[in-house]
Image: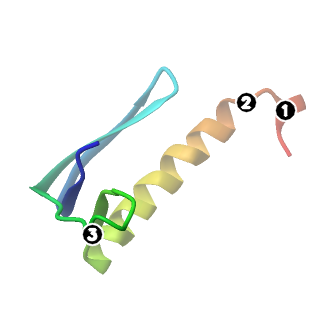
Amino acid sequence: MKTYNIELQKVKSQSYAHGLIKLHIDALVSPALTPEDKMPTSSLSFTEENARVLLSLLKTQLAELDGRKAKSRRN
């Protein structure tokens, strides 16, 4: 398994179709160097500003999804 360090620079746009949320972003991707004794894992890092943008976009998309559910399936 290849592991990467991913640094989110900018969220450009977001869309939802057929059960898939798609983000268009600018990011820096570099190979991660992991010690032999740790499990390989990729990491994603971003600024507080980008985190707030991402959270806002996801909340909007999830609210739209909830609006599409049948009334009997809403909580």
Query: Is residue 47 placed above or below 38 in the rendered structure?
Result: below
Question: Gap in Å between the C-alphas at discs 2 and 1?
Answer: 6 Å
Residue drawn at (17%, 64%) of the image: 33
Quadrant housing the N terminus = top left
The outermost residue toward the bottom is 48
Closer-to-camera residue (52/44): 44
Picture quadrant of residue 72: top right
Q: Position of residue 39 (x, y in %)?
A: 39, 60
Q: Amino acid at mark 2?
A: Lys
> Which residue was labeled with disc 2?
69
Residue 52 is left or right of residue 71, and the answer is left
Disc assigned to residue 45: 3
Q: Amino acid at mark 3?
A: Ser
Residue drawn at (44%, 63%) of the image: 55
Neighbor class of circle 2 (other Cα within 10 Å; few <14, some 14-19, many 20+) is few
The reply to whether discs 3 and 2 touch (Cβ–Cβ < 8 Å) is no
Q: Position of residue 63 (x, y in %)?
A: 60, 47
Which sits earlier in the primary sequence, circle 3 or circle 2? 3
Picture quadrant of residue 9: bottom left
